[in-house]
Amino acid sequence: MKKNNSLDLSLFILIAKIGKTRGLKGEFFLRSFAQNPETLLCFKKFYAFSSSGMDEVHFEFIKQSNSNIIAKLKSINDIEEVKAFGQKDIYILKSELPQLEINEAYWFELEGMQVLNLEGQHLGTVHEVSNFGANDVLMVKSINEQKQNLLIPFIKHRVIISVNKLENSILVDWQEDY
C-alpha cells in the first residue's frame, strides 16, 4: 500500500467492499456498488481508508467469476493475512468516473438537488439516495419542517421525469401527500 495523506476525502467515492475470503491463497470476494459489477474492472487506482488517511490499494487481480467478483491484493498471500486486513471499503477518485449523458447523474450528484413536481411545487431537497431492493429511493427532506420527509422511488420516465444538473433540480411526477 502506498500512503497518500494529503488527499481531500471529498474527492473519493465508495465503489466496493472487501467481502469473505475465498480459498487459502489470499483471494476474497469483492462486493461492487456499481450498477454493473464488471465496471470495477475498468478502474486502475483504488484506495482504502486507514487511520493515517487514504492508502492506495494495489490489486494483483480483479476478475469476474460467474456473478461474483474475485480479487487478490499484491501484498497478501494467505487467508490469515486477508482476515487481518479486514473487510474494508474500497474507493476510487470521483474524477475517474466515466462521463454520463446530459440527463443522467451519479447518486452523489443527486444529493442536495431541489425536487419539484409537475405542478411546480417545491417538495424539498434530496438528502440521501438508498436502495431497498426493488429500486433506488430518493429521501427528500421537506422544506416545511412541520411535514414529514418524502421517500420517492427513482423510476425513470414514470416518477422521475428529468434530472437537470445545470439547474440542480429533479422534476418528479409525485405529490407532497403521497
Image (cartoon, grey):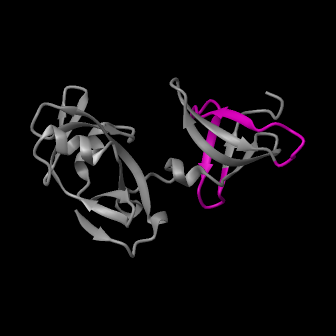
Within the image, what quadrant is residue 81 found in? top left
Residue found at the very far right of the displayed protein: 146
Residue 158 is a magenta residue: yes
Q: How many marks?
A: 0
In the foreground, 76 or 47: 76
Residue 73 in the figure: left or right of residue 87: left
Residue that appears at 34% across and 39% down = 32
Residue found at the very far bottom of the displayed protein: 6
Residue 68 is situated, as x and y percent measured from the top left of the image, at 24, 30
Q: Main secondary structure of the magenta part?
A: loop
Do we see residue 80 in this rendering? yes
Residue 13 is situated, as x and y percent measured from the top left of the image, at 43, 55
Image: magenta residue range? 143-169
Residue found at the very far top of the displayed protein: 134
Residue 80 in the figure: left or right of residue 117: left
Residue 118 in the figure: left or right of residue 1: right
Depicted 170 relative to depicted 28: above or below: below
Within the image, what quadrant is residue 21 found in? top left
Residue 93 in the figure: left or right of residue 82: right
Residue 150 is situated, as x and y percent measured from the top left of the image, at 74, 36
In the foreground, 54 or 149: 54
Q: Where is the N terminus found, in terms of image quarters?
A: bottom left
Residue 65 is situated, as x and y percent measured from the top left of the image, at 17, 30
Depicted 160 relative to depicted 85: above or below: above
Residue that appears at 20% across and 26% down = 66
Residue 155 is a magenta residue: yes
Depicted 73 relative to depicted 31: above or below: below
Residue that appears at 87% across and 46% down = 144
Residue that appears at 34% across and 61% down = 96
Q: Where is the C terminus found, in terms of image quarters?
A: top right
